[in-house]
Image (spheres, rainbow, N blue to C red):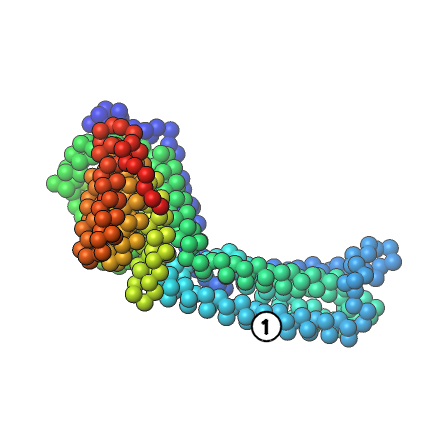
Amino acid sequence: MAVEHASLRSDAGSRFRRSRVGVWFWELGYRIGPNLWVTPMCTAAVAIGVFGITRRLDPLVDDPDGIRLVPEFLVARTPADAALVLSALLAALATALTLVFSTSVLTFSLATSQLGPRLIRRFIEDPVTQLALGILLSGVVLSTLTLASVRTGAGAAGVPEVSYATTVLLALACFVVIVVYVHRVATSIQAPRVVASVVADLDRTMTELDLEYRRLGRCDNRAAVERRVAEVEADGADVLAVNDGFVQVMDLDRILALAERDRFTLVMRRRPGQFVVRGQAIARVGPADALVSARRAVDEAVEIGDSRTRRQDLEFALYQVVEIGLRALSPAVNDTFTGMTCVDWLTAALCRLGQQQPDTGGMLGRDGEIRLVERPVPFSRQVKAAYDMLRQAGAGNPAVMIRMLDDLATLARHVDVAHLDDVDAQAEAVLASGLSHHPVAADADEIRRRYRTVAGAIASRRNGGDAAAGTGTVPG
């Protein structure tokens, strides 16, 4: 068995095991990311540190042999002048901070109603929003501390000149940040930008998974994987979930390391993005006497939480785009252009997904044995996830049906030949949906013509010819 599997290895002997620190950092970032208080609190702490440094530098400005640290235009001549300016800046920054918080909450509300609640995390994690809040809060903190130290300043007039100058400069920077923040809000809530950013996240997820799978030993022999799965099913034991929730991430290195050490094979029953109930089988281990070791591996390497994440869940990013499209095509909104934009970006993502060879899900240990079997997401499921609900919602809209058929023709020209049946099935479903609402004759003829274009592209690929040959020119 080991000799047979060794021939399936993909650089398995040269792999290295990463520590679990990477997963810990990911989990820490995922928990802290959607919080509006972390970055502001950190910047406020930095502001307190800056104030301490400037107070140390204040005595140098009155030293005749010292260095002139503060330009003339940032010097307050009297404590009254300094107090007046600092009070005005403190009031302005406090008002601006309140405004930014209010605007952020309003933006989140609009995003929830127009784009869907799953995208709230994206807006909360926006670095510009978090930095804007943090810089404004640091301005308020520094202004307050400097104002409180005006009468006890190191200068002859009782003005802490370095602290005062630093506060004025930070206040000017805060007003610049407000302008940048307003521009960011105005552009970030536009549906095309949101859809493009979600698809960019999907691309990053695909790249990360591809790099991880290349580093790990993948078994491309489907028959060997199926045979090993059958052995585990016949002579194994179920590993039960200890929590309710979504499978968020699996530490593949950790599972493989423990499986190699204790010589067992783990067949996952759930993949990232799927929901598990406490007591439900999340995996099956073979042989059965390795159940204790397998349970420990699952507890240590599989994260279960209350929401889906994009790290190993390709469908999650697809569904985010689909949700935007569904809201756009709803009778309450009726935004056909946004719906077609979603279809275009989903097609772009599927073109990349469809160029990958079907995955067996098997992973090899250093010993050449199959030690882990995942549940890969088949391309047929990805196509259904991207198109089905939008097709159902837009069935009565000929423009959406035509655009979907155009994109399916593009998809047929780019995906691997093994996936053409999935494209063909979806094209037939779009044709049936588009004609089921009895569009006018001109629209019905156009839908049929676009379907023939898809069928021509699929036939050309199957015959081994040029993907674009014989398809004609497709109007945009």
Q: Is residue 465 visible?
A: yes
Residue appearing at x 59%, y 61% in the figure: 179
Residue appearing at x 68%, y 73% in the figure: 88
Q: Position of residue 146 (x, y in %)?
A: 69, 68
Front residue (pair 67, 124): 124
Q: Position of residue 393 (x, y in %)?
A: 26, 58
Secondary structure under the numbered disc 1 in the rendered image:
helix
Residue reaching furthest to the right: 64
Is residue 170 depicted above or below 341 in this figure?
A: below
Q: Quadrant of residue 353?
A: top left
Q: Quadrant of residue 95?
A: bottom right
Front residue (pair 22, 198): 198
Q: Quadrant of residue 349?
A: top left
Residue reaching furthest to the left: 234
Give the side of residue 177 with respect to residue 278, left or right. right
Residue appearing at x 23%, y 41% in the figure: 452
Residue appearing at x 75%, y 71% in the figure: 82
**Disc 1 residue type (three-letter):** Thr
Residue beneath disc 1: 95
Front residue (pair 330, 273): 330
Give the side of residue 96 with respect to residue 226, left or right. right
Count of marks, rendered view:
1
Q: Quadrant of the N terminus?
A: top left
Q: Position of residue 169 (x, y in %)?
A: 69, 61
Q: Position of residue 68 (x, y in %)?
A: 82, 56
Mark 1 closeness class: few <14, some 14–19, many ≥20 residues within 10 Å? few
Is residue 85 depicted above or below 240 in this figure?
A: below
